[in-house]
Image (cartoon, rainbow, N blue to C red):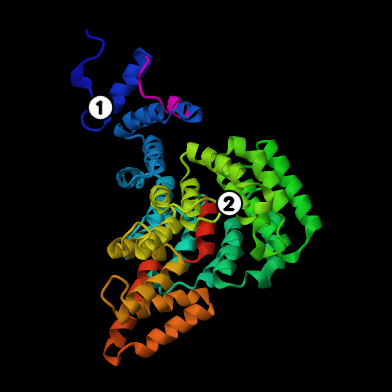
Amino acid sequence: MPIFDSRLAPRGPALPLLALALAVGLGGCAGLPDQRLAAEALKRGDTQTAEQHYRQLAELGYVNAQIGLADLQLANGTPEDLAAAERTYRQAMDSSPRAKARLGKLLARKPGASSEERREAASLLDQAFTAGEPGTLMPLTLLYLQYPQDFPGMNVQSQIATWRQQGHADADLAQILYYRTQGTYDQHLGEIEQICQNMLAQADVCYVELATVYQKQADSERQQALLERLMNGYHSGALPAQRVDAVAQVLADAELGTPNEGKAQEMLEAIAPNYPAAWVSLARLLYDYPALGDIEQMMTYLDNGRAAALPRAELLLGRLYYEGKLVPQDPHKAEQHLRKAAPSEPSANYFLGQIYLRGYLGDIYPQQALDHLLSAARAGQINADQTLAQMFSQGKGIQPDLASAYVFSQLALAKDTPQTTELAHDIELRLPATDQLRARRMLNEERQVRGITLQQLSEMQAQTP
């Protein structure tokens, strides 16, 4: 009798699983897909081997392998890979709250996501949260705050209060996010400090919040104790370099209080050899505080950042050549570096728009200027809104359109300067009565496209797991 009689083999989906089990049981052969080997490959940075194992197991229906494969696809970041990650998460979502959470986060951050996709993202995150999946409350709160038009019945503060009453730790972080977006952060410094002192051991983002609180309060003694704890945690491997970088940025921010740029530089230099993003932060620190180093040192930092393929390095180098303050102005070099940064850095699109609008390359390219400025504006660059308002108001290379000028001038008011106020007032006075209804409708539509494009939101989103 043969060892294996095919007439006894199960039919349908069970067959490949049985075939794999038999292969493993009989041979233990090298080359068979193995989730443990995939995890080990990831630790070595060998994503190709990890993907190979995950893909084979995913095709056999293993949910954890499907999630691992989708995570790798998501990390690649190309539009094709993002679409593939979405499809792969969807294969696993019915069997895994973790897959629902991952898919919800993907849809929430998806460029150009529709209202339906954002509502689906909220539903998936809510389901994952109910199932006990960690790391879901913050992206869910971000969705509610960023796109209130998609959730008209949602009282965000009331919902956060309910979560806090139920004892969900992330709800306290959601409360801090709410204060940031509502502009009431400074009125709740004591509460924020208490929240983060209690959560510091389990939520390392609280190092950033506490550093911000102490910077605003000019409490150097408590801040110094916090920084010592932070660096001890980093050197022991308990805290990521990303948090050290973020806290250094707080220390260097003159808008939060008296800056401590020297300490920021010391912290960044400690992590840069093992955390390439810190090279760019160091270069930006020298840009803001030239007394900390010379242009040669800055360019060395940027070269290190570019060697690690960091778009922020291309952005800052492009800006240097655009401005011509620290290096000779060179619009062509500026364009070259800014184009590399533009897919992920909104400011790069703003500078590119200015290059094309001002004719820095020898001629004016109005359509390219419009495309880049609009991309920058929709990513939260208020200066781009002001420039667009001027373009449509004055007809700089395009047909004048006061209705469009009205839209961007109103959005630019978030900057709250005399220039933006004067521009908006002037355009509103010139807007014909026959265009006022259309202009207001266009403004509402543009606001719906954007949601709330506050810098605090993007910063907090970057810190959200």
Specify whether residue 224 is painted magenta.
no
| Outermost residue toward the bottom in this view | 433
Q: N-terminal of the two: label 2 or label 1? A: 1
> What's drawn in magenta, residue-wise?
30-39
For label 2, the crowd category at 10 Å Cα-Cα, with few meaning under 14, some 14 to 19 and many 20 or more, is: many
- Residue 284, which numbered label? 2
- Kind of residue at badge 2: Arg
Q: Position of residue 167 (x, y in %)?
A: 61, 59
Specify whether residue 34 is painted magenta.
yes
Q: CA distance from mark 2 to mark 1?
A: 58 Å
Instruction: Between label 2 and label 1, give the one nearer the viewer.
Output: 2
| Outermost residue toward the left in this view | 7
Element type at marker 2? helix
Residue nearest the observer in this picture, 301 or 454: 301
Q: Is residue 102 visible?
A: yes
Q: Is residue 71 above or below residue 124?
A: above
| Outermost residue toward the top in this view | 1
Name the residue at 33% across, 74% down: 445
Q: How many marks?
A: 2
Q: Is residue 149 left or right of residue 210?
A: left
Q: Quadrant of the N terminus?
A: top left
Element type at marker 1? helix
Badge 1 is on which residue?
Answer: 15
